[in-house]
Image: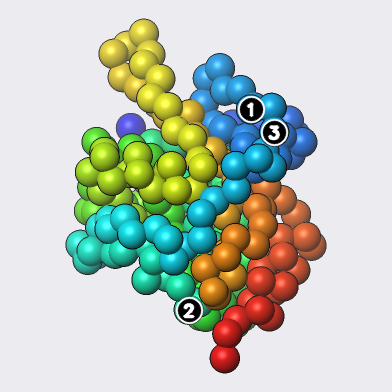
Amino acid sequence: MSLSRRLLLGAGAVTALGAGALGLGWWQVDGPGAAQPASPTRNLPRPLGEMDVTLTDHRGRRVTISDWVGRPSLVFFGFTWCPDVCPTTLSDISLWLEELGPDADRLNVALISVDPERDTPEVLADYLGYFDPRIVGVTGEPGEVARILGDFRAKAERIEDVNGDYTMNHTAGVFLFRADGSFGSIIDFHEDRRFAVPKIRRAMKKEQP
């Protein structure tokens, strides 16, 4: 299936999903049989400065997560075959960046793939061409991705289907970090810009000089 077709299908499917997802908070995951853990407040992400995992971005460059300290960061977990949550969230992020204006240039903005088997840097580069160019795609070896999921206290699970293919359940909130690398908050799936953009601005006000 072509990327444009997948994005069109996702745009239609997310209408039904969105109403339910808004109440689930940052542990909402995308995929069949997805469940919400009991308490989203017990396992907050580690500070970015403590994350020494090195991955590869969509331009083929090696990226160490701790190097993001010094700028506020927006981080989202997803994958390019995601039918609804991922394209919707990336479209939302693109709109947030547009509303932030020139201030958006001070942010690190990243999609970390939970599907490294299919999401090569080249595939991510093609996929992200549909969204704001400031969004960086990041992938890596399965072990590297597992480590960064653990650092973020995020979840991803491969789900096989009857046709021998698979999809991924995954945490769907957008992680917001301050410039010093400390965790700021979560922007929930499809959160209204009236609330999402002020959250980002509050984190940006705490930038270190």
> Considering the image in quadrants, where does the C terminus appear?
bottom right
Q: Which residue is mark 2?
A: 70
Q: Which residue is mark 1?
A: 37
- Assign a secondary structure to mark 3: loop
Residue 165 picture location, percent across and down: 31, 19
Residue 101 picture location, percent across and down: 61, 80
Which residue type does callout 3 highlight? Ser
User: Where is residue 94, by image quadrant?
Assistant: bottom right
Residue that appears at 63% across and 66% down:
96
User: Where is residue 42, by image quadrant?
Assistant: top right
> Considering the image in quadrants, where does the N terminus appear?
top left
Residue 147 picture location, percent across and down: 35, 44
Q: Is the residue marked by circle 3 packed among few (<14), some (14-19), or many (20+) residues within 10 Å?
A: few
Looking at the image, the residue that sits furthest to the bottom is 209
**In the rendered image, the vertical position of residue 23 relative to residue 152, given as above or below:** above
State how far apart marks 2 and 3 are (Cα).
Answer: 30 Å
Looking at the image, the residue that sits furthest to the top is 162
Q: Work out whether mark 1 precedes mark 2 in sequence or the reverse, and give the earlier one.
A: 1
Badge 3 vs badge 1, beta-carbon distance below 8 Å: yes
Residue 30 picture location, percent across and down: 54, 31
Q: Nearer the viewer, residue 169 or 178?
A: 178
Q: Which residue is mark 3?
A: 39
